[in-house]
Image (tube, rainbow, N blue to C red):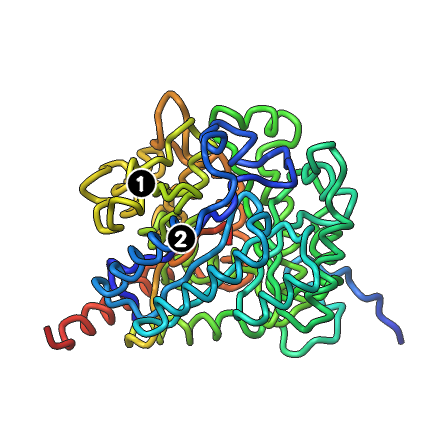
Amino acid sequence: MRSESSLNYIVKIASRCNLNCSYCYVYNQADTSWRERPAVMSKDTFNAMIERVRRHALLSGQETVTIAFHGGEPTLAGSSRFAWMCATARERLGDIARVSLLVQTNGTRLDSTWLAVLGEHDVQVGVSLDGPKEINDLDRVDHKGRGSHDAVVRGIALLRDAGMPFKILSVVRPGADPLRTHHHFLELGCTSISYLLPAYTHDTIAPVRAELGPTPCADFLIPIFDDWWFNSSIDVSIREFWNLGRVIMGGSSQLDTLGNPPLHFVCVETDGSLQGLDKLRSCEDGLTDMALSVHDADFGEIAQANPFHAAVMKGLPLPSGCRACPERDTCAGGHLPNRYSRARGFDNPSVWCADLLALFAHVRARMGVSHEETALRRSALRQARERLVVAQPS
Amino acid sequence: MSHAQPQATIEERPTSVDVEPRVQDQLRDALEHELVAVGDGRADDGAFMFTDT
């Protein structure tokens, strides 16, 4: 079981990227801090981080530590250094916790050497791709404006042919053909897909609404939900739909995009600095910075050092505009970056509020679960958990 | 005697792929099973990972 203080780690081992996606919250939105960071995390910094991770895991008593290698594009750190990082993590943490390693890559640089490293160190692979070529290459381009689709698909083919499971992480492109997108992922042999809502804020959403109407993300996702509902088995995993169902059935979301739950992860930059929820980079320059570093602070110091990020990790209060909403306990305002405006901070419903309500209504209708049933199930689950706490010896 | 088949509505839409069982037959039970495990302490509840992984 996870303890309340357990943490997982998003480790930015490269702060540059060989792609230049138009919507990237690291390079092409409000935050510019990447310019000041080392291009690649040094071994000294990685060692310092792993020692902090070890100390925190011993304190929290968590049974599993997940380290997600992220960027930028993490393969820019080089396969040799990456292999050393994986081996170091397992060596330094393996005696106190199960170590789960992930990498989130754009897939364009995968080759036989990388596949050997990923396989040898049992690293789960997520690949970023937004759809077929004509959709993906609208936004996911290199620094010369050339589309990345063909290179990504070459990388995916290597994974598939090697029998290595992979997940596709896709940013919804409002207005794109949803089923063409979804079927493309299935045709690539992917059975684990995540559809992310774009990182717009209340300060940037107006052109999308003007062009595509009030519910462009629901218009994209509902046909995919129905295709999944009628034509797939649950062996095809779509993370957002699973979690929509989970909160409708009275559980908590396992994603930070839904339900405003406490966060159990922290980001570590290439220079060792600790960062909060990474997507807050889309809101304000420097907003994610915790002013702490693995070189001089433990992860347990976050709460004392930075009240804003401590509050983010606990779950910010419900937006005042959501208090009377029937989905206030399931959606809880949506993802934090989508709540932001310069005028009101995070005290706004999500920019995707109408989309989320349409999705909830649709999934409820398909599953046959009313708001009343959700409330009853939520209450029963809470009581079961409370009985469990009382029954456990102190 | 033949009868014209009504157009399927969104609520009645049949499957077009021969997959058994399908999500519509599985999702409720699978989630219920998962949440029972949360209730009796065999599984975690709540957010555990950054959405961009």
Q: Is residue A67 above or below residue A129?
A: below
Residue, x 43% and y 62% (percent of image)? A246
Q: Chain of mark 2?
A: A
Residue A318's tag is 1
Asked which secondary structure carries label 1, the reply is loop
Relative to the observer, which residue lies in front, A268 or A369?
A268
Which residue ends up furthest to the right in the rendered image? B1
Instruction: Report, in whole angstroms, how far the alpha carbon at label 1 lies from the one at label 2.
Output: 36 Å
Residue A41 position (above or below residue A126)? above
Kindly identify which numbered label has been placed on residue A46: 2
Which residue is pictured at 36% across the width and 64% down the height?
A: A65
* Figure quadrant of residue B16: bottom right
Q: Are marks 1 and 2 on the same chain?
A: yes
Relative to B28, say whether A279 is above or below: above
In this rendering, the label closer to the viewer, 1 or 2: 2
Q: Chain of mark 1?
A: A
Give the residue furthest to the top. Answer: A343
On screen, residue A148 versus residue A287, left or right, reads: right
**Residue A60 drawn above or below residue A48:** below
What residue do we see at 21% from left, 39% from top?
Answer: A305
Q: Looking at the image, tell me whether mark 1 or mark 2 is earlier in sequence order.
A: 2
Residue type at mark 2 is: Phe
Q: Which quadrant would the C terminus of chain A be assigned to in this image? A: bottom left
- Residue A297 on image: x %, y %: 24, 46
In percent of width and height, residue B7 lies at 77, 60
Alpha-carbon neighbours of circle 2 within 10 Å: few (<14), some, or many (≥20)?
many
Q: Are marks 1 and 2 in contact (CB under 8 Å)?
A: no
Q: Position of residue A24 (x, y in %)?
A: 57, 36
